[in-house]
């Protein structure tokens, strides 16, 4: 799963030299989902994002992991896709807190590992 | 008395006859001598001229065109004379001596250049690895943007060095995995100055075999750079693909100025790659692009031509990749999302596994941020887990590449 040391396609080509996302709505857990499945006119990375999201909403961190791109670069791609109407942002609703049981499971798991 | 006068007459006649005879002979002799002298003078002039020609035209021509001794047969007076043969011998000796010196100088210059380029190339490669690591480590857009610029410049530097090294007989370096043609062209785009002007149309579903990836990337990069530099900064450079029965052609069209016949011939000679290129004759500033492409094309078995016109009046460069250099694309299948089990599944580390909500599973439209979701509806627990699971997996995969980086972050 370790990314190749020197990818053939450099990042400046992926985003056109930009590292600032056009919108500031993304953090690692922001979820995005497909709004318009058309992929014409998209770059290969953007097409791959659309492919990934076709199965359901995905978080920014996951998309970055699948694309093997830095999170900031992924945010640039995602905000372009949101701008063009291909994706929509779904932030986890603030009201829905994880259940105590789940948190307990996470805690147990972490304890078991550390 | 009569006898005396008769005798005198006879004597005079004989004397006259003799003198006449002598005179006639003398005259003939003179004429012949004059003729001979004229011939000799002409021969001398011819020799002078031949020598002059040798010094002024013949030898410089031998110097200028390596491996092509001028075949100028001596006509007229010098035809098949020893002098002509000797002159030819001198020219021949001069040519072979010049060739020897030239190839020796070329070899030693290439050797020096190759060694120098190898050092710079490995430095550029190391730098690229460091830049790649930094790009993964720094989240700040301002820092990242600067890193992108540095990476871009480093890629150009690497390309120039690589092309020079290839021209000097070095290998392009770096064995890559078989890569899709799309990645190959975009990889080439990464290495040129005006990368934003490159427009790639269509996505052929083929890949280039491992050993040919780097050479093809380098050749395409040189052609793209050439196209971008010889056209207006506001015009795009288009890349199209055409599948043929025995391979695939990459076509690069610019909207610049077309090449004239002489330039085309020179370019064709360089791109052919069968003749060794003299590093001393690359011009000032040295033009290594076509020469390097020629070397690569001959070595790896693809063809490059620039003799057709682009639809926009500029040059259309065509890289023809034969079927031997192509292979099927192996794309990563999009991750499959398993059905949601009733009981929580644990990861190998003992943590609850992230479960993903299938979009459109219940046929419901995706809710956008602006449209408020129904808060009253009880959310399934798997959706709650999604956020945490995503955070966990994302962090892990994001940091998998640089363990030291993650430790650093944790300490902060």
Image (cartoon, grey):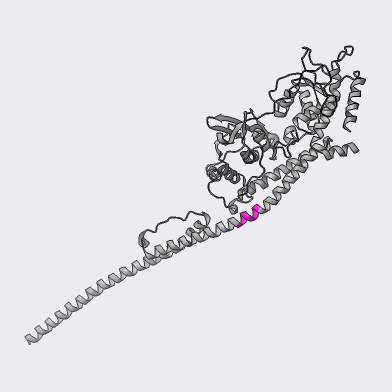
Residue B304, image quadrant = top right
Question: In the image shown, does A19 or B406 lie closer to the viewer?
Answer: B406
Residue A92, image quadrant = top right
Question: In the image shown, does B347 or A12 lie closer to the viewer?
Answer: B347
Query: In the figure, B31 relative to B345: above or below?
Result: below
Question: Which quadrant is home to the C terminus of chain B?
Answer: top right
On the image, the x and y values in percent for residue B214 come to: 64, 40
**Which region is colored magenta?**
B108-114
Lateral position of residue B88 relative to residue B186, left or right: left
On the image, the x and y values in percent for residue B282 come to: 60, 50
Number of residue marks: 0
Q: Residue at x 88, y 30 (%)?
A: A112
Question: In the image shown, does B177 or B150 lie closer to the viewer?
Answer: B177
Q: Residue furthest right?
A: A100
Q: Residue furthest left?
A: B2
On the image, the x and y values in percent for residue B7 come to: 10, 84
Question: Which quadrant is home to the N terminus of chain B?
Answer: bottom left
Q: Is residue B139 magenta?
A: no
């Amino acid at each position: 799963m370790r990314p190749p040391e020197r990818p053939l396609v450099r990042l400046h080509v992926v985003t056109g030299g930009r590292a600032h996302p056009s919108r500031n709505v993304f953090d690692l857990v922001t979820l995005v989902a497909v709004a318009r499945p058309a992929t014409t006119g998209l770059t290969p990375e953007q097409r791959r994002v659309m492919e990934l999201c076709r199965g359901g909403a995905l978080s920014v961190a996951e998309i970055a992991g699948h694309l093997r791109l830095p999170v900031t670069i992924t945010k640039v791609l995602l905000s372009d896709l949101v701008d063009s109407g291909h994706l929509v942002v779904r932030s986890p609703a603030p009201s829905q807190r994880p259940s105590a049981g789940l948190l307990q499971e996470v805690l147990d798991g972490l304890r078991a590992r550390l | 008395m009569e006898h005396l006068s008769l005798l005198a007459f006879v004597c005079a006649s004989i004397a006259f006859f003799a003198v006449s005879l002598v005179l006639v002979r003398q005259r003939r002799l003179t004429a012949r001598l004059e003729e001979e002298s004229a011939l000799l003078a002409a021969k001398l002039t011819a020799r002078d001229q031949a020598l002059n020609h040798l010094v002024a035209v013949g030898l410089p021509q031998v110097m200028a065109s390596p491996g092509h001794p001028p075949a100028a047969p001596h006509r007229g007076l010098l035809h098949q004379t020893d002098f002509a043969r000797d002159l030819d011998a001198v020219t021949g000796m001069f040519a072979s001596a010049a060739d020897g010196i030239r190839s020796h100088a070329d070899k030693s210059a290439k050797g020096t250049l190759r060694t120098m380029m190898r050092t710079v190339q490995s430095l550029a490669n190391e730098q690229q690895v460091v830049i790649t690591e930094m790009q993964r480590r720094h989240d700040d857009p301002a820092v990242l943007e600067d890193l992108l610029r540095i990476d871009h410049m480093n890629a150009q530097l690497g390309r120039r060095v690589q092309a020079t090294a290839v021209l000097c007989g070095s290998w392009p370096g770096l064995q890559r995995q078989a890569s899709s043609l799309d990645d190959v062209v975009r990889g080439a785009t990464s290495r040129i100055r005006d990368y934003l002007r490159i427009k790639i149309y269509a996505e052929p579903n083929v890949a280039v075999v491992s050993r040919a990836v780097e050479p093809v990337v380098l050749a395409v990069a040189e052609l793209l750079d050439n196209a971008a530099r010889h056209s207006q900064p506001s015009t795009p450079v288009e890349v199209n693909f055409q599948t043929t029965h025995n391979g695939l052609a990459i076509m690069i069209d610019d909207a610049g100025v077309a090449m004239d016949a002489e330039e085309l011939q020179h370019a064709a000679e360089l791109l052919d790659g069968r003749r060794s290129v003299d590093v001393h004759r690359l011009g000032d500033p040295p033009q290594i692009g076509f020469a390097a492409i020629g070397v690569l094309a001959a070595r790896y078995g693809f063809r490059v031509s620039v003799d057709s016109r682009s639809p926009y009046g500029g040059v259309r460069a065509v890289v023809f990749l034969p079927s031997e250099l192509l292979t099927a694309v192996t794309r990563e299948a999009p991750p499959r999302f398993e059905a949601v089990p009733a009981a929580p599944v644990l990861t190998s580390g003992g943590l609850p596994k992230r479960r993903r909500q299938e979009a459109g599973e219940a046929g419901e439209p995706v809710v956008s941020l602006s449209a408020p979701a129904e808060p009253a509806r009880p959310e399934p627990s798997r959706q709650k887990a999604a956020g945490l699971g995503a955070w966990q997996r994302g962090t892990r995969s994001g940091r998998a590449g640089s363990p030291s980086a993650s430790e650093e972050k944790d300490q902060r």
